[in-house]
Image (cartoon, rainbow, N blue to C red):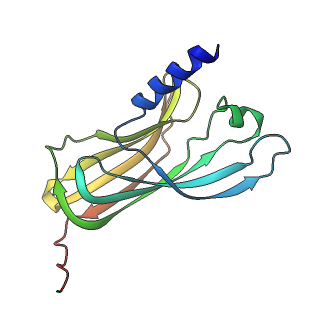
Amino acid sequence: MRKLLKPLAAALALVAGAAQAETIGEVSTVFKLLGPNHKIVVEAFDDPKVDGVTCYLSRAKTGGIKGGLGLAEDRAEASIACRQVGPIRFREQLEDGEEVFKERTSLVFKSMQVVRFFDQKRNTLVYMVYSDRIIEGSPQNSVTAIPILAWPQAAN
């Protein structure tokens, strides 16, 4: 059984999206006697196609025995804030609605994803986080926007 789970976990990690999240911090929201507590985590990831942009995602993680084993389904609520952290440079052509981050929030059927849009008229990048499920998704979402501005050069 263990031999089957390792390749499955590796395959799911590859499908998890282009950007990898780094945990910035977390707070417990509900104490669980067995297994980890329910919590809210704050993660950061860089846009894989746009240099100079970092997004911060806040989302719920289910604890308890099921959560500790990776079998629980996390809630659909999330919040996102993306910021310009350096000069913005596009590495490749951008596609509206392109997925820049994806993480599973249940064993198989549910995921949370971040997509990017480029509002050319206003020279602004727009990021939206939402949760989907194979059968039925959730309309809950959060959006953030970054106007593309000149980045100040460092003085020598």
- At horizontal 52% and vertical 25% (from top left) the residue drawn is 9
* Horizontal side, residue 90 vs residue 40: left or right: left
56 relative to 135, above or below: below
Pick the quarter of the image with the N terminus. top right
Residue 85 in the image: state x and y as whole percent: 30, 67
95 relative to 80, above or below: above
**In terms of depth relative to the viewer, which is nearer, 141 or 114?**
114
Total label count? Answer: 0
- At horizontal 41% and vertical 44% (from top left) the residue drawn is 20
Q: Answer with the quarter of the image where residue 33 lies.
A: top right
In the image, farthest residue toward the right: 33
63 relative to 56, above or below: above
- At horizontal 51% and vertical 20% (from top left) the residue drawn is 8
Residue 35 in the image: state x and y as whole percent: 78, 40
Pick the quarter of the image with the C terminus. bottom left
- At horizontal 16% and vertical 61% (from top left) the residue drawn is 123
In the image, farthest residue toward the front: 3
* Horizontal side, residue 6 vs residue 30: left or right: left
Residue 83 in the image: state x and y as whole percent: 34, 64
* Horizontal side, residue 104 vs residue 39: left or right: left
Residue 118 in the image: state x and y as whole percent: 21, 51
